[in-house]
Amino acid sequence: MALERTLILVKPDGVQRKLAGKIISRIEDKGLQIIAVKMLKITPQMSKQHYAEHVSKPFYPELEGFITSGPVIALVVQGPEAVSVMRTLMGSTNGRASAPGTIRGDYGASRQMNLIHGSDSVESAKKEIGVYFQDSEICDAPSVLTPWSWAAEEA
Ligand code: IDP
Ligand code: MG
């Protein structure tokens, strides 16, 4: 197992619907560590970098319109297997199909406005973290709770 970092966004719908606190609480409740956070407005250029794999898809113009429509909250989250742990916590892409108990399953009913982004691999995470954060903005300080969150051999 490995200590991983993943890039999380509370998307514009999550911020506008005032669900950011609940969404961030779920990440904290899970025991993962938030090591960077900022609020910003994504530009069309950043959207094209972030969603490079989707730029040529028919839904991309709508997606860019949505993700640039208002502020987002970007976070870097760290923990053992943080990429897949966050994807499980988020639920599947379409809020209408995502399981109850997940963030998307509990708070949304849209495929596009699905509240949260989480990187889909360690490689994507590395690239996406670079879109939003400089190395100096990441606060990887030891947490006194870490020994109660996962065993040393798990990280
Ligand atoms: P993911 O966020 O669960 O990884 P992706 O397939 O990578 O899902 O899609 C990226 C984002 O694009 C989704 O979270 C959603 O906001 C939006 N999206 C995905 N598929 C569609 C679609 O068919 N129509 C409109 N928006 C979509
Ligand atoms: Mg994706």
Image (cartoon, helix red, strand yellow):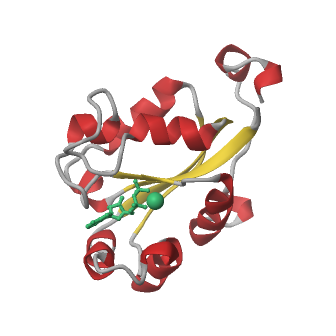
Q: Report x, y in % for residue 71.
A: 34, 65
For the image, the number of numbered tags is 0
Query: Please, is residue 109 above or below residue 141 in the view?
Result: below
Image quarter (top left, top right, bottom left or bottom right) of the C terminus = top right
Residue 82, given in percent of the width and then of the height, sits at: 61, 39
Q: Nearer the viewer, residue 99 or 108?
A: 99
Identity of the residue drawn at 58% across and 32% down: 32
Residue 109 horizontal side relative to residue 90, left or right? left
- Residue for point 25% across, 61% down: 112
* Residue 78 seen: yes
93 is higher (above) or lower (below) than 84:
below
Q: Position of residue 3 (x, y in %)?
A: 74, 37
The percent position of residue 24, horizontal first and vertical second, equals 42, 39
In which quadrant of the rendered image does the N terminus lie? top right
Viewer-proximal residue, 153 or 26? 153
Is 29 displayed left or right of 96 in the figure? Answer: right
Q: Is residue 31 left or right of residue 112?
A: right
Q: Is residue 79 left or right of residue 86?
A: right
User: Which sits in the foreground, 79 or 142?
Assistant: 79
